[in-house]
Image (cartoon, rainbow, N blue to C red):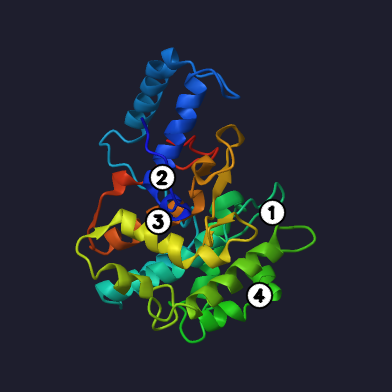
């Protein structure tokens, strides 16, 4: 039997995502849910996923589902420009720069709408959805829009003073190219800046990249430690989310059949885990080892079905 959470703080973990989701599965398996579970189809589903994976990645060298997948586009020079600037940095500073890029880039990612698209320099075709949003944020980062001093850094001062005009220009927004939720994205960036300023013990230089030094105090870095710090330091920026026992729970929701107590809350932490996978890749790409990635969960989103 799955152990029940006894406090709101226990819900801030990948383990809670897994255990609470297992309770929902058991509830559905018993015929009491809103869906039917046909476990006789599981082998067929597993074989389809396995065969598709082998066809696309025959060496099974499968990249993370992370923000880094969105920075490359045929003809675009943005990723090459970033990598060129990286060459002048040592390992630790490369990791810091990567965090400075990835944190705001992930937080700027939300549904773009059916119309919006982005045209990177050198490209012949416009790019929409998360791929376009990723490239637009990379372009802003390289242009120094998230920094008060250097194009390869992000700092709280620049984030808190970011304007809607800057976002409109960076994301090529116009009446003919509207982007959904510009105000929410701006609030998220300004909120990130304030969250950084509120935690000087974690961010002594007032940049997201300070998280690198915070994490590498333990070697090897644990993937769950990355998620823990993401859930901790970003808690203040999530708008209108559930707060229980003074704990901001982010992407967590009451499941009515389980009642109204703490054990009725189902956490997903989708964006936080996506950010975590992206930060783990950032560390590994510069040679910093990360253990226990399998302790994280699949993401509950339509693009990958939680796989």
Q: Residue at x 59, y 54 (%)?
A: 242
Task: Identify the secondary structure beneath mark 4.
Answer: helix
Residue placed under numbered mark 2 in the picture: 16
Task: Identify the secondary structure beneath mark 3.
Answer: helix
Q: CA distance from mark 3 to mark 1?
A: 27 Å
Q: CA distance from mark 4 to mark 1?
A: 17 Å
Q: Which dot marks residue 166? A: 4
4 vs 3, front mark: 3
Farthest residue to the left: give it: 219
Q: How many marks?
A: 4
Farthest residue to the top: give it: 40
3 vs 2, front mark: 2
Say whether disc 2 or disc 1 marks the residue closer to the N-terminus.
Answer: 2
Whether residue 145 can be seen here = no
Residue placed under numbered mark 3 in the picture: 276
Q: CA distance from mark 2 to mark 1?
A: 36 Å
């Amino acid at each position: 039997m799955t152990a029940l959470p006894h406090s709101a703080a226990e819900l801030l973990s990948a383990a809670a995502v897994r255990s609470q989701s297992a309770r929902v599965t058991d509830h559905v398996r018993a015929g009491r849910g809103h869906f039917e579970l046909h476990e006789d189809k599981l082998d067929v589903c597993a074989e389809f996923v396995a065969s598709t994976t082998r066809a696309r990645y025959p060496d099974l060298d499968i990249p993370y589902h992370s923000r880094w997948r969105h920075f490359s586009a045929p003809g675009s020079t943005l990723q090459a420009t970033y990598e060129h600037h990286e060459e002048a940095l040592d390992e630790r500073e490369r990791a810091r720069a990567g965090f400075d890029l990835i944190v705001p880039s992930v937080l700027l990612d939300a549904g773009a709408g059916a119309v919006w698209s982005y045209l990177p320099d050198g490209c012949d075709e416009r790019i929409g959805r998360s791929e376009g949003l990723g490239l637009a944020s990379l372009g802003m980062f390289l242009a120094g829009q998230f920094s008060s001093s250097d194009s390869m850094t992000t700092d709280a001062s620049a984030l808190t003073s970011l304007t809607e005009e800057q976002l409109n220009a960076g994301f090529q927004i116009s009446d003919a190219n509207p982007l959904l939720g510009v105000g929410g994205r701006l609030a998220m960036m300004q909120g990130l800046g304030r969250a950084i300023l509120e935690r000087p013990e974690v961010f002594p230089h007032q940049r997201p990249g300070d998280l690198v030094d915070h994490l590498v105090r333990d070697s090897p870095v644990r993937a769950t430690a990355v998620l823990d710090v993401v859930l901790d330091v970003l808690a203040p920026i999530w708008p209108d989310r559930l707060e229980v026992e003074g704990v901001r729970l982010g992407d967590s929701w009451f499941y009515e059949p389980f009642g109204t107590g703490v054990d009725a809350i189902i956490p997903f932490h989708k964006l936080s885990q996506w950010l975590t996978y992206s930060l783990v890749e950032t560390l590994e790409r510069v040679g910093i080892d990360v253990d226990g990635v399998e302790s994280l969960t699949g993401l509950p989103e339509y693009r990958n079905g939680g796989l």
